[in-house]
Image: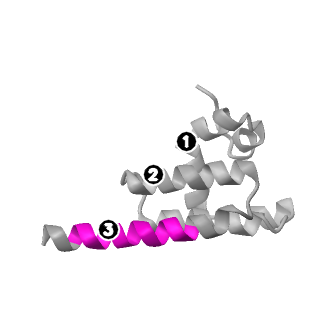
Amino acid sequence: MKGYNADKREAELEKAREAKDSAIKDLNEPSQVILNRAYTSLQNGEIDNDRYYQILSVLNKTKGNLSEEELNEEVPEGFVDYLNDRTQIARDLGVQLVLVYCNIKET
């Protein structure tokens, strides 16, 4: 059973990697960093597949230059929660807008 679960997990990670590789070329640098971190979080078991694909979906939508109003409507709570838990992403990029938008206080 362990072998089956390991194989299944590996197949899920491969599918997620392929989705990341396909999407990343069309994303801006901050979005690329967020997506790479999300993939790493998935690999490490910090997030599940549903959260990963939610993040990927939001990042794909933002490459279409949505208005602030559209983003407010479109961004699922899970995406904001992911960013709230990873303020290091914002620090690494120097993107204070993410901190302000998500109402995150630096520690």
Label located before the other in sequence (2 or 1): 2
Residue at the spot of label 1: 86
- Relative placement, left or right, of 47 versus 27 is left
* Snapshot quadrant of residue 92: top right
Image point (68%, 46%), residue name:
102
Give the Cα separation between the discs numbered 2 and 1. 10 Å
Q: Is residue 103 magenta?
A: no
Question: Mark 2 highlights which residue?
Answer: 41
Instruction: Name the kind of residue labelled 1 in the image.
Output: Arg
Label 3: which residue? 9
91 in relation to 54, above or below: above
* Front one among 62 and 3: 3
| Dominant secondary-structure state across the stretch colored magenta | helix
The x, y position of residue 71, in whole percent, is 77, 63
Q: Which mark is residue 67?
A: none
Is residue 75 among what the camera can see? Answer: no
The quarter holding residue 72 reads bottom right
Under mark 2, the amino acid is Ser
Percent position (x, y) of residue 67? 87, 63
Q: Is residue 83 visible?
A: yes
Image quarter (top left, top right, bottom left or bottom right) of the C terminus: top right
State whether residue 101 is above or below residue 14.
Answer: above
